[in-house]
Amino acid sequence: MIAVIEEAIKTRIAEAGLPYKPNVATYGGEFDEGLECVVRSFPAIWVAFGGDGPGKALAMSKRVWRFPATFAVIVAARNPRSEAATRKGDVLKVGTYAMLEDVRRLLLHQDLGLDIEELTPGRTRTLVNARLKSNSVSAYVMEWHTSYDVVLGEPGGPEPLMLERVGLNYHLVPDDGQADAQDLITLQGGNP
């Protein structure tokens, strides 16, 4: 489910038709190495799974668990005019403040068509280091929170079966091998 949520966030942003046409991708450590190459793709928005848990059992059988999850959305822009222009933008280039607003507008209260709790915003913080500043780069990371349910089965085994109906056959004595009467009971909502 983690990969599905991450991809849905990425798709929501990529398909929004933002006028500055950001490069939207899954974060793979772009700021760790090769920053000079990465800035060519700016403005950019990356999505990454931030972590989940601890889970909470939702049923007595402890087969259905709800996991809170955090996803990170990183926005980055470059503007050689000035440090302030990287954040505020100008007539030619978008700044990271406008990018943050766009991401909030696109993700706030969205379930992305998935069986998850609506996305809610968390902390937003700046990514600052000497390499970013010296390359006229502004970058922020936003946290987004949701939760999703997992139905647990045996490790590596099939999903657990849900009991939906019970069939009863009645045989009169002497029994001739054929049911003399039958009942089919349908359970409401199944039995996890």
Image (cartoon, grey):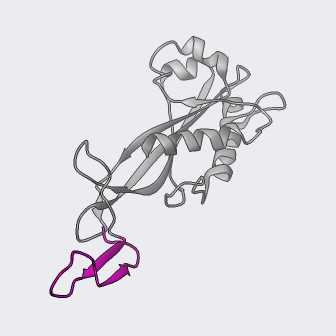
* Magenta residues, start to end: 164-192
Left or right of 177 in this view: 163? right
Say which residue appears at 33% left-offset and 82% top-offset.
182
Q: Is residue 83 left or right of residue 59?
A: right
Query: Is 116 situated above or below 93?
Result: below
Q: Is residue 67 above or below residue 46?
A: below
Q: Residue at x 27, y 61 (%)?
A: 63
Residue appearing at x 47%, y 44% in the figure:
71
Q: Residue furthest right?
A: 91
Label count reads: 0
* Residue 62 location (% of width, % of height): 24, 64
Q: Quadrant of residue 24?
A: top right
> Residue 97's x, y, as percent?
67, 41
The answer, for residue 127, to whether it is visible in the render is yes
- The answer to whether residue 72 is seen in the rendering is no
- Does residue 19 show up magenta in the picture? no
> Residue drawn at (23%, 71%), measured in percent from left and top?
60
Q: Is residue 175 above or below residue 44?
A: below
Along the line of sight, the residue nearer the viewer: 148 or 71: 148
